[in-house]
Image: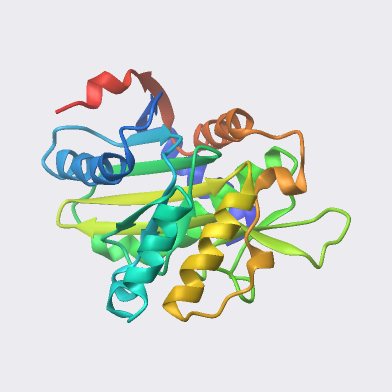
Amino acid sequence: MTIRELSNMQQAGADSRTLTVVRQEKSLGAVRDLDFGIDLLGQARTGGIGPTLRLYRPAPTVAFGQRDTHLPGFGAAAQACRELGFEPLIRKAGGRAAAYHEGTLIIDHVEPHADAIAGAKGRFAFFGEMLAQALRSAGVQAAVGEIPGEYCPGEYSVHGADPYFPAHQVKLVGTAQRVVSGGWLFSSVVVVENSAPIRSVLTASYAALGLDWDPATAGAVNDLVPHLDVDAIEEAVVSTYAGYANLRHAEFSSLQP
């Protein structure tokens, strides 16, 4: 998808779509943070809420995919996470293990949709490019696409290039999607600060699971552009979303069931 196509698609919807932006100030805990996104999807599909964007900084977590749990080393991988200060969880979406902590920004985007399944693949491409555009607006050389050896590999991952060594690319954003009858949840994890603990826990987890990957592909936004922090990336993401929809802001308490 080209920037022009993305811009045209954003503008086509921005005039008629309203998106409620909610900032969750504190983690609810690893388990509840993950479950709350599913709760929001349930509210959206039943008409309890409209299109909503939830932004938050999570507690240290390693979210394993369903396939990971069937590997003989899963128990050892989970224990390694705990020893390194990360809570091991199993997410309902696909993919392999992904790690995040307070230096990451999680974006949960939910919308009611009559035929949510039909547009699933297109959403990966569309929102992947949107997030790459947001990072570029903050000064990161970002693009969509899997890089060799990345953790939790995905066709629509967002990666960044070192401005001084362009051949060195690191994964910055992983995306996942859950689609149900009547709605969808698109979750994105942007690694912004402090990549070392993430690299360490992924190295231990993948070794226990017996999965190959290249630890050099695990990085953070501020490994590439040192002055950037989570607040700056959140601002860039929200500004980019303003081209997708009319934004309104609400307190997190408005989402509590």
Does the image show residue 17? Answer: no
Which residue is pictured at 11% across the width and 41% down the height?
Answer: 46
Q: Is residue 190 left or right of residue 52?
A: right
Looking at this view, name the residue that lies furthest to the right: 164
Specify the quadrant that holds the N terminus: bottom right
Which residue is pictured at 50% across the width and 57% down the height?
Answer: 174
Residue 143, located in which quarter of the rendered image? bottom right
- Name the one closer to the observer, 196 or 255: 196
Looking at this view, name the residue that lies furthest to the front: 83
Which residue is pictured at 45% across the width and 50% down the height?
Answer: 188
- Name the one closer to the observer, 58 or 78: 78
Which residue is pictured at 49% across the width and 72% down the height?
Answer: 206
Q: Position of residue 88 (x, y in %)?
A: 35, 56
Residue 19, placed above or below residue 73: above
Specify the quadrant that holds the C terminus: top left
How did the renderer colour the structure? Answer: rainbow
Q: Is residue 228 left or right of residue 104?
A: right
